[in-house]
Amino acid sequence: MKRILTLAAVTIVGAVAATAADITVKGSDTMVILAQKWAEVYMSKNPDVKLQVTGGGSGTGVAALLNKGTDLANSSRKMKPAEVAECLRMFNRRPTEHKVALDGITIYVPESNPIKELTLDQLRLIFTGKTRNWKEVGGPDARITLYSRENSSGTYEFFKEHVLMGRDFAARAQTMPGTAAIVEAVAKDKNGIGYGGAAYGKGIKHIAVRREASTPAIEPTEETVVNGTYPIWRFLYVYLDPNLDKGEISKYIQWMRSDDGQKVVKEIGYFPLPQKFRGN
């Protein structure tokens, strides 16, 4: 599997945030390590442009966009119809949506866990609390500890819709403030399981996923995400007020989606957009 990274924090600090920003970026914690790296690389090539990047979750980013508190909203899910309607009210136009990368939502377990693969049905039963012991899915006789994201997270919403099929997470699932926090918790808990972006991985291992018990177990790699064989893949998005999609903001988004920007996507551990998706 490709190189994977982890960060202990989701709010971008340091040189990026130390100066007044020309362009502000807020939202998805899944995307925050990518957004940070994009900002660093772009500012090194364009010293007259200043970028400030913070996380907080996809819902937080979209809310900030609607309140005119950020120029760009990073989101690991599509905007909801109600959010689009609010954009129409605020901006008199639909929000501009840019696909900027691909991701495979990854299942995390500690490196000591002998489990190598799970089906979508098994994941659904685990995260809804129906399956409570690892021995029920071929693991040790130990109670499963669940780690999840807060409900403002796009990853939480995507996982609930596409894996849990709209069912609620088990009440005992521990809510974590970001993907890095889930990775850290799972790495320290021999009975833990969590989920998040493919670019995180220190101290944990990624579980292969079977769409059904009779289908192959697939790992989240560039090939399997791009060709759609990995069952839990998605786009990562940037949204903005269409009235601001010009000048330096437009140039920055175009750069993200260019070969140079997509090279950063791959370096961080996510998956570049195939050319057919770069025209939105």
Image (cartoon, helix red, strand yellow):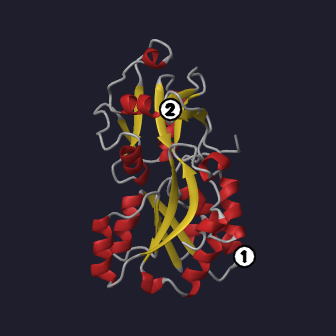
As rendered, which of 214 and 106 lies closer to the eye?
214
Q: Is residue 115 left or right of residue 27?
A: right
**Residue 159: where, in percent of width, then height?**
41, 45
Secondary structure found at label 2: helix
Residue 165 visible here:
yes
- Disc marking residue 239: none
User: Which residue is nearer to you in this view: 13 or 169?
Assistant: 169
Tell me what residue is drawn at x 36 percent, y 60 percent. 59
Task: Please identify the quadrant where the C terminus is shown.
Answer: bottom right
User: Does the rendering let one see residue 50?
Assistant: no
Which comes before the other along the chain, label 1 or label 2? 1
How crowded pointer 2 is (Cα within 10 Å; few <14, some 14-19, many 20+) is rated as many
Do residues under tags 1 and 2 come within 8 Å of each other at their CB atoms?
no
Decide: is 139 above or below 150. Answer: above
- Whole-percent x, y for residue 32 in the image: 53, 58
Vertical arrangement, residue 134 with respect to residue 117, above or below: above
| Three-letter code for the amino acid on which mark 2 is drawn | Val
Identify residue for label 1.
Answer: 45
Q: Measuring from the top left, give residue 250's x and y in whole percent.
A: 56, 81
Residue at the image position 63 percent from the left and 70 percent from the top: 257
Dot label at residue 186? 2
Task: Determine the image quadrant of residue 131.
Answer: top left
Please, what is the three-letter code of the amino acid marked with disc 1?
Lys
